[in-house]
């Protein structure tokens, strides 16, 4: 589920938007009336959407956008006159008065984009630190010297042990080094 924060100057308006979203299957992580509250709530989350109006009690949308944590997108709701000022800056806009279907389809589209980014990030292999690379290299060299393995065989052996034990290959290499150096 994508985290959604609704930040509008009037608490009852924010709750109304939250209720519409919840009834349509979205998860709303928070409702607030200031930009500072929205940023505070967003800081505890990995990614999501902040739905806001042009002006909040303590800041305008552009200041909030500049302070949002990485991974968050903004959905700005404002009049057509105000929306014309903010085109081309990576902010999704909805004109007021708001149509419920427009809100639901726009939030759905934004959630789909965030889900795609999450899946893509999961598929990307994690970068190893230089220490982890050194441990893997040392374990392979030790296996090659003691067990007369090729580098490829040593690497496959570490991979197999890693998969069987449910640990990552760097941790398996450290365990192998500690066992063989005793």
Image: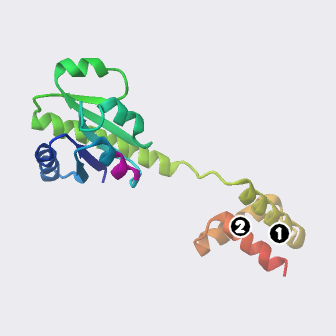
Marks 2 and 1: in contact by CB < 8 Å? yes
The span from disc 1 to disc 2 (Cα, nearest Å) is 9 Å
Q: Residue at x 40, y 51 (%)?
A: 43
Looking at the picture, tell me which residue is in the foreground, 71 or 60.
Answer: 60
Q: Horizontal placement of 61 versus 126: left or right?
A: left
To which residue does mark 1 refer?
Answer: 143
Q: Main secondary structure of the magenta part?
A: helix
Q: Is residue 175 magenta?
A: no
Looking at the picture, tell me which residue is in the foreground, 19 or 182.
Answer: 19
Dot 2, how many residues are within 10 Å of its Cα: few (below 14), some (14-19), or many (20+)? many
Magenta region: which residues? Answer: 39-43
Image vertical order of residue 4 relative to residue 87, above or below: below
Residue 137 on image: x %, y %? 79, 59
Element type at marker 2? helix
Among all residues in the image, which is located at the extreme bottom?
182
Looking at the picture, tell me which residue is in the foreground, 124 or 61.
Answer: 61
Element type at marker 1? helix
Q: Quadrant for residue 73, please give it.
A: top left
Image vertical order of residue 142 relative to residue 92, above or below: below
Q: Residue at x 84, y 82 (%)?
A: 182
Q: How is the image coloured?
A: rainbow
Give me the disc on residue 158: 2
Q: Residue at x 10, y 33 (%)?
A: 99
Residue 151 on image: x %, y %? 81, 59
Residue 28 on image: x %, y %? 23, 52
Q: Horizontal placement of 75 versus 22: left or right?
A: right
Mark nearer the N terminus (1 vs 2): 1
Dot 1, how many residues are within 10 Å of its Cα: few (below 14), some (14-19), or many (20+)? many
Q: Quadrant for residue 90, please give it.
A: top left
């Amino acid at each position: 589920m994508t985290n959604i924060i609704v930040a509008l100057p009037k608490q009852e308006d924010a709750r109304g938007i939250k209720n519409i979203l919840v009834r349509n299957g979205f998860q709303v992580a928070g409702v607030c009336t200031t930009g500072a509250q929205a940023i505070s709530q967003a800081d505890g989350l990995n990614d999501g959407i902040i739905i806001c109006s042009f002006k909040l009690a303590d800041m305008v949308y552009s200041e909030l956008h500049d302070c949002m944590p990485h991974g968050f997108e903004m959905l700005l709701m404002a009049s057509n006159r105000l929306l014309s000022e903010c085109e081309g800056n990576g902010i999704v806009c909805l004109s007021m008065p708001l149509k419920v279907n427009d809100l639901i389809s726009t939030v759905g589209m934004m959630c789909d984009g965030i889900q795609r980014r999450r899946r893509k990030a999961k598929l990307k292999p994690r970068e190893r630190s230089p220490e982890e690379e050194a441990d893997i290299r040392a374990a392979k060299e030790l296996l090659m010297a003691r067990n007369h393995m090729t580098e490829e065989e040593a690497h496959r052996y570490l991979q197999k042990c890693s998969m069987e034990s449910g640990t990552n290959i760097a941790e398996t290499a450290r365990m192998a080094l500690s066992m063989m150096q005793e």
